[in-house]
Image: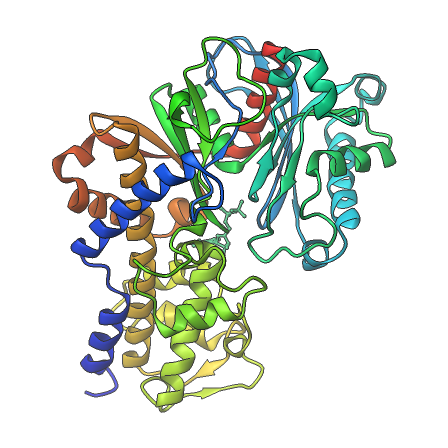
Amino acid sequence: DTDALPNPEVITRLNAMFALPLDRLKVIVKQIISDMKTGLERDGGAIKMLPTFVTKRPSGRERGSYLAIDFGGTNLRVCELVLNGHAGEPQLLQSKFQISENVKTGSGSALFDFIAECVRSFFQTHHALDAHDWNSKRWQLGFTFSFPVDQISIKAEIENFDEKESANLSTDTSFIQGTLITWTKGFTATNVIDRDSIRLLEDAFERMNLNIEVTALVNDTTGTLISHAYQNPDTYAGVILGTGSNCAYVEKFSNITKFRGPPPPLGTTEMLINMEWGGFDDAQVVIPRTKYDLLLDRNTPTPGSYTFEQLISGMYIGEIVRLVVLDLARTGDLFAKATIVVRSPLHKQYGFETSYMSRIERDHSFDLADVKALLEGDEFEIVGTTLADRKIIKAVCEMIGLRSARLAAAGVCAVVTKMNKLNGCTIGIDGSLFEKYPHYPNRMRDAMREILGISSENILLEQAKDGSGQGAGLIAALAAEAA
Ligand code: ADP
């Protein structure tokens, strides 16, 4: 029955494009390690290797109440973290807000006003009864701003620094600075690049009469690492597999030879590095790219930038599936007997959400009934698909989902090898791909087993829950301890 069986040639052709065999993965791991080393020596490499100024992990004895903002993807979260001096589940209050296209692509001041607005709304929700108390208190806040930022220092280190020099460094009340190097993940708000994001945020707080001081600037990867380390001290890396993809890990301070700025506290042996691994292989030398990957990249606001992230993360891989499906429909390999309405989101950029890949891969019914429901429903309005069509679509999702997991695994293998931790460590991983995409964690583990052999079993990949909010609060607490 030709309606039930996909054309094997189509599957073979696509497989050849998207497969990442072991020898290729090994080349990728080697190149990541080499780029990591270069990035620690000098700026300007493919992997930015940004020093985070976070020089210790939590002890579990932290105390106090800290605010945190998590900004950098699909949603914004405002959290309050209450630490009572012993590790375990800390108390976490939070509110979540969707970040609209207008906010992402409008003016920078509107973007920071939106953030301040969300904080005000958080207080109204969680502190309606003690409004006087929260108004009179000066809050300390950890700001998770998950974009590539060139940071000068988290506050604590600057204060330990020679007073004359810190006076030169800061021209305003804020002692920490972090300038946005480039937007990623579809953000384009104006007048933010090359400016101090802390200053922009504190100005917005002032405009809204919020008595808040930003004491730590954090990347979501760093926050994930720190918050997972609070529960599990053996955590040596934090990985994000959500809207974007990135990793932070623990590096020997003496290896960060490009480090500039005030010296960290005496006795510092380690500093977390925000890799910004999304920029790996932007020169497109080691990872095979398909015509679909190249097309996706050309249609982003920043072509040629963060192309590793495009092959991995939730913002993009659904779009790659969409481009493949459209192309197969054009060549007649798909939907030969089906009708697609003109307004179907299949025709719109980013019209195929990555969560649909999860839904499709989760359908194990013999006739792929749920895939049919998805295609026929309001989502796509594609009527009359054959079982062969649906099998091809599921196979496409598998190939692209598998490639994403294998690349993420290559990244983790490189980091663990670089840290010399093949004898064992824990990696905290946050993001919808790892959490919700069926088989994703196991596909990563399988690839790690191929690359590292038996040692891969010493490397624990653990789901980090809400890492970036809690982590930013913890880093604000660490900064307060050091001050
Ligand atoms: P963040 O924006 O903080 O990274 P998430 O980790 O939730 O937030 O990642 C959001 C991304 O994950 C979006 O790109 C979305 O398309 C994708 N996503 C959401 N749900 C799923 C799912 N069930 N399976 C796969 N991807 C998903």
User: Could you tell me if residue 363 is visible in this image?
Assistant: no
User: Could you tell me if residue 172 is visible in this image?
Assistant: yes
Image-based side of 159 in relation to 273, left or right: right
In the rendered image, residue 413, in percent from the top left (x then y), is placed at 27, 40
Q: In which quadrant is the C terminus drawn?
A: top right
Relative height, residue 170 to residue 354 (above, below): above
Q: Quadrant of residue 42?
A: top left
In the rendered image, residue 34, in percent from the top left (x then y), is placed at 31, 42
Q: In which quadrant is the N terminus drawn?
A: bottom left
Q: Name the residue rendered at 59%, 10% in the picture.
A: 481
Nearest to the observer: residue 49 or residue 230: 49
Q: Name the residue rendered at 77%, 32% in the picture.
A: 202
- The image shows a total of numbered marks equal to 0
In the rendered image, residue 446, in percent from the top left (x then y), is placed at 20, 46
Relative height, residue 242 to residue 234 (above, below): below
Q: Name the residue rendered at 43%, 80% in the picture.
A: 326
Q: Name the residue rendered at 44%, 54% in the picture.
A: 309
Image-based side of 459 in relation to 95, left or right: left
Type of colouring: rainbow
Image-based side of 127 in relation to 83, left or right: right
Nearest to the observer: residue 150 or residue 430: 150
Image-based side of 352 in relation to 212, left or right: left
Q: Quadrant of residue 288?
A: bottom left
